[in-house]
Amino acid sequence: MNRSPRTQRGASIAFAVLAGAAGLFAGTAPAHADTTPALAPLAWFVGHWRCEGRFANGKPIRSSETFTVELGGQWLHMRHADDPPNRYLADSWWGYDKAAKHFTATVFDNFGGDRRYTSPGWAGDTLTLKNTATSGYLDRFAFQRQGNDAYRVTYTYRNRSGTWQLGDEQSCTRDARTTRS
């Protein structure tokens, strides 16, 4: 087939884009290679996850979570999206505060939420992010690793009596199409 230089250039660009996209999903490099040493303990999350569980009232919840390393390995970006009929969407940025010597997370959601969390890091197989709010509303996320390709995330909040109350729990498994080496 005889192609013009313009068509060949377009085909080359399309191939480069497709090859680059395939590289994003192939997961051939270890995730920690892209992170700074301070953020490396969280690199385990990098990839695509499918989650399902229940709200405290028993209603089912399903969602997807995607973690990517961003901004020169300084940040882990998490994108959470509930499956319909639920509507919650959130972008979170996880990093490491060198001065305070703890992990941080800032969550922005589609309801106008803007919350900040801290964590000392992994305690065994559990990473707990606690809200640092001074507004009185306190909540936390506990991520519990369950092998190499699964975790359970539990969301709790302080109710009016000051006790922790379950909001929801989900079990997440790494999407097999995006396994990493």
Image: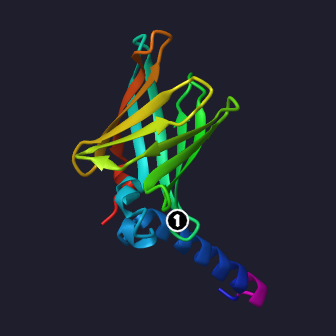
Dominant secondary structure (helix, strand or loop) of the stretch shown in magenta: helix
Give the quarter of the figure containing the N terminus: bottom right
In the rendered image, residue 12, in percent from the top left (x then y), is placed at 64, 82
In the rendered image, residue 10, in percent from the top left (x then y), is placed at 71, 79
In the rendered image, residue 76, in percent from the top left (x then y), is placed at 50, 56
Residue ID at (58%, 45%): 106
Report the span colored magenta: 3-7
Question: Is 37 located above or below residue 3 in the figure?
Answer: above
Q: Is residue 21 left or right of residue 42?
A: right
Q: Nearer the viewer, residue 26 or 111?
A: 111
Residue ID at (54%, 67%): 21
Residue ID at (31%, 49%): 122
In the rendered image, residue 55, in percent from the top left (x then y), is placed at 43, 18
Q: In terms of secondary structure, where does tag 1 sit?
A: loop
For label 1, count other residues whose C-alpha is less than 10 Å away and answer few (under 14), some (14-19) or many (20+): some
Q: Give yes or no for residue 139 being in the magenta stretch.
A: no
Q: Quadrant of residue 70?
A: bottom right
Q: How is the image coloured?
A: rainbow
Q: Amino acid at mark 1?
A: Gln
The residue that label 1 is drawn on is 74
